[in-house]
Image: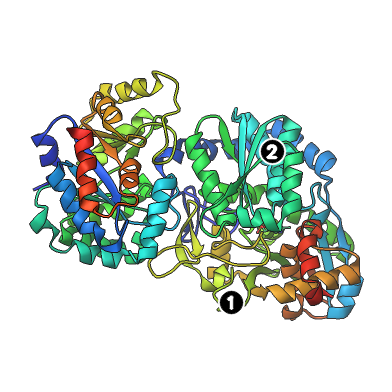
Amino acid sequence: MNPTYQHPTERGYYGQFGGAFIPEMLYPNVEELRDNYLAIFADPEFQREYQQLLRDYVGRPTPLFEARRLSEKYNTRIFLKREDLCHTGAHKINNTVGQILLAKRLGKTRIIAETGAGQHGVATATVCALMGMECIVYMGEIDMERQKPNVYRMRLLGAEVRAAMSGSRTLKDATNEAIRDWISNPVDTHYIIGSVVGPHPYPDLVARLQAVISEEMRKQLLEKTGSELPDYVVACVGGGSNAAGAFYHFLEEPSVQLVAVEAAGHGIHSGHSAATSVLGKPGIIHGSRTLLMQDEDGQITEPYSLSAGLDYPGIGPLHAFLAESGRARFISIEDEPALKAVSECSRLEGIIPALETAHALAAIGQLGAGPEEVVVINLSGRGDKDLETYIKYADTIM
Amino acid sequence: MNRIKSAFQKKQKGLLNIYFTAGYPRLHDTVPLLQALATAGADLIEIGMPFSDPLADGPVIQASSTAALHNGMNMRVLFSQLQGIRESVPDTPILLMGYLNPVMQFGVENFCREAAAAGVDGVILPDLPLDDYVQEYQDVFRRHKLRPVFLITPQTAPERIRRIDELTDSFLYLVSGPGTTGGANTQAAGVQDAYFQRIEDMKLRNPRLIGFGIGDKASFQHACRYAEGAIIGSAFIRALDGVDDVPAAAQRFVQSVVA
Ligand SMILES: Cc1ncc(COP(=O)(O)O)c(C=O)c1O
């Protein structure tokens, strides 16, 4: 099959991005996944169980809500895809439900995960509780501090949270530790990676599990607007899983503008940013060739964003390809406008978004969308986990 | 002349390969360490090219890499340090070990040319996939007479081990068990020996060195029962911790293992 945006090549490439750059110690695990994931996903029994859990446990389909007051303010037609209403409060659980079923079929008994904002950690701890599996979540020490409620949620769910103490002590470092754990536990353990990153087949595997977002969007848009196709789909990008899910069934629809929003932190060129598509060059991180923030010696540079879920120096290889080919437009949003978007969405629509999601909301004004045009924002998560940050920055927000 | 082959011909059993991180503990310790190790009787030497995110490494090598980067080590500095090294260390095989990204950014062709010019014999890049090596790197490596070294683990399938054995003309790096560098052996009694024996029974072309978790005379000698030799990294780096006379410490360490 020719590679498309939806389907990487057999070796996991989207254009020049992707692949599986892993030490030999991980090879058997990754090979086992690669050789089995498509057949398992295609198995009717897997699908029956997965769909049932999505409906009865996650609460899907999530609503597509027409945001009238935001629409009025920006003079365009805005819909919010309510992933914040998923069980555990973000899109992350679409992926973990699928991967826990996959892990069971591969005979694994121990689950590891990395987490930044804690949403993927909570979603993993949740499905492990549901299936009675041992769960260990790696989280950067800085992130444990700024997303404290999620640390307690994971512990309440029976997971062990281990602090990653190296590097910038954030998502990148938590991912390093999770990979090292997998190297040390190659037989009984499945690594539930939380975004469309990592060695092939993870980017494709996670994108397929998140694709339910855009599958539902198409049906809901047809019902609400008379067309399955919007003019814009907007999503924030940390590693890029909610964006991959929101874009997936529109990737091959050229009339739909795909907009990926990255975190610019204190400013793209401030030295404190996570705007990978602007600052990154091709390189290898966590087993994947992608756009990567690095110095001229190929050392990975420490990213920064106030938002723990976007604070990552790479993006998934699909997104690197979307950026390079121009299929998606990339916008960067700084901390401050993101915080302002939190209060705007809260006050105009009665929805308190996650800080990650707020970056997507803050980009609405830059789209150039006309009054007749339809804009879908993927509301990837709710803001409960960020309350402490929102209190701290109340002066900016209010 | 292939120094790696000669080393294994000269001494068929009990070869000691010592790993250290370039630019650690101080930026300019690289060359004195090389010389001290060769003099003390290390049979092969692996120089770690520090990387910010060394996925296959445990805490000791992570920390030495971070320190080395902080000291200002990078590929250009390393190659300039290695200039002329074959005058003082003529025969001991030197291998460079590191991660693919810094090599990619330096440029594979440049990297191989500089390494060969400095007298480097082999390269270990754990995150370079076999297929990518064959398709994109093999020609360049061969042109510069650099030998790749590939890792084998307890989970590596027999056909893959055969393929790895075909792809190189140096030695096979037998990872002693599941885990990153410097980890203790957590396998049940007999499991590790059975794995070493299984590989020995395959009668491979290349000699084998066992690495990961080898740290003293006892573990070195145990490993040498199943292979031509063994590799020590983390334990050696720990022995350099806080010492003033780095070459003397290196010499003492080698003696403690082989004497
Ligand atoms: C609510 C929310 N949105 C977005 C993200 C970013 O991840 P991704 O880019 O994989 O969707 C996170 C990550 O933690 C998150 O919690």
Labels 2 and 1 share a subunit: yes
Farthest residue to the front: give it.
Answer: B244
Residue drawn at (69%, 73%) of the image: A335
B230 or A262, which is in the foreground?
B230
Q: Which mark is residue A268?
A: 1
Q: Mark 2 or mark 1: which is in front?
A: 2
Quarter of image, res A269: bottom right
Q: Position of residue B161 (x, y in %)?
A: 32, 33
Residue drawn at (55%, 73%) of the image: A278
Disc 2 is attached to a residue of which chain? A
**Are the two marked residues, 2 and 1, in contact with CB atoms closer than 8 angstroms?**
no
Quarter of the rendered image showing ligand 1: bottom right
A215 or B28, which is in the foreground?
B28
Left or right: B234 in relation to A273: left
Farthest residue to the top: give it.
Answer: B190
Q: Position of residue B83 (x, y in %)?
A: 16, 64
B143 or A29, which is in the foreground?
A29
| Amino acid type indicated by mark 1 | Ile
Work out whether residue B222 can be spotted.
yes
Which badge, 2 or 1, is on the more N-terminal residue? 2
Residue drawn at (70%, 35%) of the image: A128
Please name the residue that numbered disc 2 is placed on: A159
Quarter of image, res B7: top left
Alpha carbon separation for disc pair 2 and 1 = 36 Å
Work out whether residue A198 can be spotted.
no
| Amino acid type indicated by mark 2 | Ala
Quarter of image, res A23: top left
Disc 1 is attached to a residue of which chain? A
Label 1 packing within 10 angstroms: few (<14), some (14-19), many (20+): some
